[in-house]
Amino acid sequence: MTDHDQQSSRSVPPRLLIDRTRNSETATAQRLAMNRTGSFEWNVEADTLDIDDAGLLVFGLDPHAFDRRPETVMERLEQSERTRLEVAIDEAIKSGRSSYSVHFRVPLDNGKEQWTHIQARILRTEDGQVQRIIGVVQDTTAEVTHSAFVLDLEKRRQRQTSIVERTTSALSRAVTVDDVTASLTGPGGLARLGADGLSLGLVENTSMNVIALSGDSVEAIDELRYTGLDRDFPLADTTLSGRPRFLTSVSALVHRYPALAPHADRMEFRAAAYLPLVAQARSLGTLALFYRERTVFNADERNLCLGLAAIVAQSLQRAKLFDEEREFATGLQSAMLPRRIQEIEGGEIAVRYHSAWSGRQVGGDWYDVIALPKNRFGIVVGDVQGHDTHAAATMGQLRIALRAYAAEGHSPSTVLARASRFLSELDTDRFATCTYAQVDLASGTVRVVRAGHFGPLIRHTDGRVGSPQVRGGLPLGISTDFGDEEFPETRLDLVPGETLVLYTDGLVEEPGADIDSGVRTLINEVNAGPAGAQALADHLSERLWERWGSGDDVALLVLRRSPDPGSPRAPRLHQYIHQADPEGLSDARTIVRQALTDWDMAELADDAELVTDELLVNVLLHTEGGAVLTLEVLPEPVRRVRLSVQDRSSAWPRRRSPGETATSGRGLLLLDAVATRWGVEPRGEGKAVWCEIGPPVPPVSTARSATEPV
């Protein structure tokens, strides 16, 4: 203390100092009491509790009747709250802490509850034993209530933020109008919006078209899907006025719109928000949200509804623009493709074109079927580089030029050479790939050329899918620029019932995988698909293009040669065995045995398998191509099997006299021993070796058959 302080204290009478101190303490106690705050001292050793008057009022105790027992205070509390307080005190004492703080509820005489807070300090002896606990007790009902209000407000704001974020995220992935409605009405759609039902109506010409309904409570107005822009109905009225409507009861809705009165009994919701959908100053329609429990819309809730409407309106505007651009692109591309595919004799053709899911990004893929002389026809599938209107225009010119060259009767290699020259002479930097084939279904001959494109796939009659090795040249345009217009032909044989598949890369481009994986998947789907050309084309479109081909357009052509099953009493099958197929012989033997078993002729299966193997081995070893195996049952009166193997070689088999050590040359001897009859016939550019297995031929004349061996 300074000299000045000492002099000041000496100059003040001692009694006045005591009064000032007492007055200060009294003023502090009064201020605490006014804030419903009191103090206490708990003598743990003596088990007595001293609480000032303010503290006793906090506990709802009469200051004149309080007996200084701690149990008297505890008895004021509910058991759960008493336990809460006791646990807090015990934990603080046992853990050695010097203080504790706890909130608990005190029941009041008027039936209400008061939130109470104790902040206490634990005083211990030198050996750590608890001696006294002193602290303050306060009525914190106002603070806790305010805190609960703040927490509730924060929860509501978090919920509103979550609704906006989830709705925005879901609609950000919507591309078409159908996608928008699916995100609103699909799984979790109503939960994202925080509503129990919705109705979405769009203006189409002069009518209101309800394109989405969701929720049990709005099914009652399903019959109002198509109405004019009539102000008697809330969707149209909201659209025309451009003002939102917030209604908190069905009676209010019916009062405002009497036309809904016949449906009122079936409406289970209590509140509805009709929100105009406006984007770029254009009124698109109205979004109605329905609620079962809500009875009021405060300012925040109205702002939330209007925000959701703005998000939906922007998504619909974007989706409608995409749909319009896609329709434009599809229409432009379709105009470049043949309007009608001719019917062919002896087979079935199916074509499909799918534009890319990228707005106005028009592709250059195309297909065509061209009539040729002598009942032949040409088929082509191709792709011009790029995805824009220039690619589509170039494709249209190239398609017409290639069609003209083919119709003139040129060979497939010449057709592509001239088409390449035509594309090179156009004022464009684009190139094109394509596969072109001339087909004669009468003989099954297919002459294929390709220019930097995928080769065809062949689905055989037993479901196996082959990918024949078709030689190819450079893409059209590039081949001319490099002075290499060689497009070698590859001959394929399409037996009755087999299917040829031509396609562009959009059908096999799987995101994240190499092109070979996509081709393998296509082969699997061709194998698993139905037999008919139309059905198979639909199957491939559904399984592949809709699965991963949305980033590119797709052209697909499926050609099936009509099957030749014979008749029930004289069935027939055909099978092509490719020279490069290592399992072809084994498959052919299996097919022959299974067919004879199915035809109740299993007793001939061993001989037929032996002859099949011998004839096919001769073709695959001594010719430059594959073979067509035909197995049929000859009609009665003699039920025999006729087996024929056709190849492209004009050289006829020769009878030989092999020595004992020779490893070949016994084929015709084996044929003589097993077959009832056999012979050789010219067939197109090659020949067919045939034989009959079964009972001997009944004698009908003494003349020798022209086809019997000499």
Image (tube, helix red, strand yellow):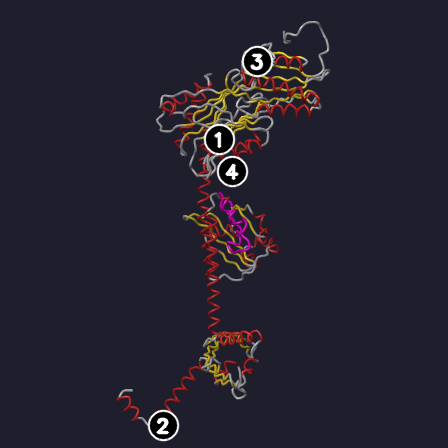
Give percent across and percent down for residue 670. Answer: 64, 14
Q: Residue shown at 66%/7% (left/top)?
A: 705
Which residue is the site of mark 1?
A: 555
Mark 3 closeness class: few <14, some 14–19, many ≥20 residues within 10 Å: some
Give percent across and percent down for residue 508. Answer: 49, 34
SS at badge 2: helix
Distance (Cα) linking label 1 and label 4: 13 Å
Q: Is residue 306 above or below residue 533?
A: below
Work out whether residue 609 or residue 596 is closer to the camera in this orientation and state it. 609
In this view, the mark in front (3 or 1): 3
Q: Amino acid at mark 4?
A: Glu
Q: Is residue 542 above or below residue 625?
A: below
Earlier residue among tags 3 and 2: 2
Quick check: is 418 in the magenta stretch?
A: no
Which residue is the site of mark 3?
A: 687
Q: Quadrant of the N terminus?
A: bottom left
Mark 4 closeness class: few <14, some 14–19, many ≥20 residues within 10 Å: few
SS at badge 1: strand
> Quadrant of the rendered structure where residue 434 is?
top left
In this view, the mark in front (3 or 2): 3
Quick check: is 193 in the magenta stretch?
A: yes
Q: Amino acid at mark 1?
A: Ala
Distance (Cα) linking label 2 and label 1: 111 Å
In the drawing, does residue 2 fall left or right of residue 61? left
Residue range in magenta is: 179-207
Mark 1 closeness class: few <14, some 14–19, many ≥20 residues within 10 Å: many
CB atoms at circles 1 and 4 under 8 Å apart?
A: no
Q: Amino acid at mark 2?
A: Arg
Which residue is the site of mark 2?
A: 15
Which residue is the site of mark 4?
A: 546
